[in-house]
Image (cartoon, helix red, strand yellow):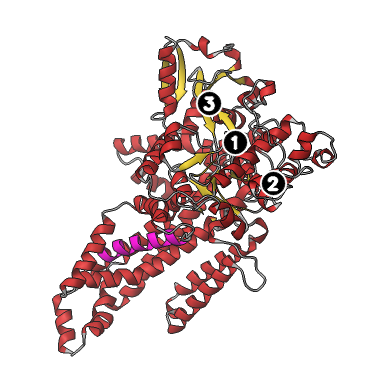
Amino acid sequence: MTTAAAWAKKNLFGSPANTVLTLLGLALLWQVVPPFVGWALIHASWGAGTPESCRQAGGACWTLLAERHRLMLFGLYPYEQHWRPFLAMLLFVALLAISSQRRCWRPWLGALWAAAVVLIGVLMWGGVLGLATVETAQWGGLPLTLVIAVLAIVIAFPMSIVLALGRRSQLPAIKAVSVGYIELVRGLPLVSVLFMASVMFPLFLPEGITIDKALRALVGMTLFTAAYLAEAVRGGLQAIPKGQFEAADALGLGYWQTMRLIILPQALRLVIPPIVNQFITCFKDTSLVTIVGLYDLLAATKASLNDPAWRPFFVEGYLAAALVYFCFCFFMSRYSQWLERELAKGSR
Amino acid sequence: MKLTHAIGAVAALALMGAAPPARAGATMDAVKAKGFVQCGVNLGLYGFSAPDDKGNWTGLDVDVCRAIAAALFADANKVKYTPLSAQQRLPALQAGEVDLLARNTTWTLTRDTANGLDFTTPNYFDGQGFMVARKIGVKSVKELNGATVCVLPGTTTEQNLADYFRAAKMTYKPVVIEKNEELNSAFFSGRCDALTSDASQLAGVRAGQAANPDDYVILPELISKEPLTPAVRQGDSQWTDLVRWSQYVMVYAEEKGVTSKTVTVAQKSPDPDLQRLLGVTVGNGKALGIDEKWAFNIIMQVGNYGESFERNVGKESRLKLDRGLNALYTNGGLMYAMPPR
């Protein structure tokens, strides 16, 4: 008996119950996998074409992506200028790749971020260097999702640390403000805040003055993420034994030194999982900005399905969008696991 | 769809009076100063307002925006679009975020009186209709007694259906499905005899999801009134006039048989009506406070109402809607332009 057969006998057919479960599992796979492969691969329509060619193929209509991926990816950004958000997106991904390397965690990384953000801003906005101006109202698709998510996370993270420290502060005023802010924001659904920002807020402004929609959405996302992150950070702070504070005091460190050198490095390392959890949530919540009338990746996908001839192939469109979201979220999740291992080296 | 309309209406009602009425003339001055029309449109409703493959806005509602830009700036492209959800649309108009709302909005008494806005004139007469398979041979809603009907829950569509059948002393079995796509496939798989929704929506469903669109017919009766009408802020009658008359001249041009292709020739016509319309005889432009060539520019760049209709929702589009109520009054429809003189 070969080892494979022995393994199968032991693990799959070891007992009558196991045998039944194995057979059921196989039957289920048989029911699901061949039709899916047939739909997604064998009968699928690939490459350029029309809705009619999809209909004739009978399977998945990947033609939809071939024909309309630019609308999905870039939303309403002027068609001839699509290279600009594309380049901005590449820059963003490169920036993230560099930032994720531990050996790049040097002061120059901050400068690099500042430079990259300016460059991305110039690319997206234009108005200088002979680039046509593109208002944020026309931004869309994946670049918009990335800009909102990354900026919200980057701004919210330091805010959340301040809030968490404020909540544990001995000073009643600071504590009250922090608690009040966190509880207020956590008590409201993001949708309602975005809705308020888009519907109520303009009515209080003088006529003719409007605040950029993308900015409104970004502020909303940031305030939100900060409140939730603050609670995660506070969890980390509370897990630090009192002895650490006392030891810092004994060394004669002040409050900020204690926090920066002793407490936060330990506390933040402890709460990497909930923090990354919040980052992932924030990334996915960007799909709610469609409420403000912005075409993020999901809304742009929806827009590309507007044409009744393409609408029957909505499954393919949403699958593609889901895949993009999954790639980013999965990267964040794997990276956080690596980071945990990397930062835990000292305590091994 | 209708439920969200209702929520939007309630939200707007709550905000009633929050914004002051616009000063007469203020909107046009502001629009001229900034050099473009800010137009509130649907986030994406094929045929009415939706971005195409290249992100350019097209549709019957979009053509109203383009007509205003053509009248004011002699350039139909001087429009910036603000896509609005059903809840956002009325507050956005009130708050001055948009100059004009061309977003398939039904003109009702409540909206007209309560929301600080004025409706101009309908650019599409919609209504709730029924679609059936051609092979069951039903020619009229009256023959649907005892039929199973697919309908979205919690909408005025469901309410209208119940009201209509009760008033006609007929019975029906509702098949209520929450999600549009599933509802439509339920109908095409034969779970119901009829599918009910706004007629323009039915046409879209037929064009997109039917294996063979010719196998399905939309019955002629409409059981509700949905006059889709552009809206402007209340109190600025100069701006209201401009939008309303820009719409009228598109219809009027069709009545007169002037199209985007023949408008240049029509300028030389001896017909005094046409001379007034196209600015050969001056007066109309001055009265509205804009260039005398305004109507010429609208017809030249956007086309007459019939051209706009066929291009966006009619024969040349995927929706293939009949003119129906939207035919000229001379052809039994409701499109009737007030005389531009």
Which amino acid is tagged 2? Gly
Percent of width and height locating residue A164:
25, 69
Q: CA distance from mark 3 to mark 1?
A: 19 Å
Q: Is residue A221 magenta?
A: yes
Q: Chain of mark 1?
A: A
Q: Residue at x 39, y 43 (%)?
A: B12
Residue placed most toward the observer, A92 or B159: B159
Same chain shared by disc 3 and disc 2? yes
Which residue is labeled 1 in the image?
A: A308
- Specify whether residue A330 is in view: no
Seen from the viewer's position, the closer of residues B311 and B14 is: B14
Q: Quadrant of residue A87?
A: bottom right
In the rendered image, which quarter contains the N terminus of chain B? top left
Q: Is residue A149 above or below residue A116?
A: above
Q: Which residue is mark 3?
A: B127
Magenta stretch, overall SS? helix
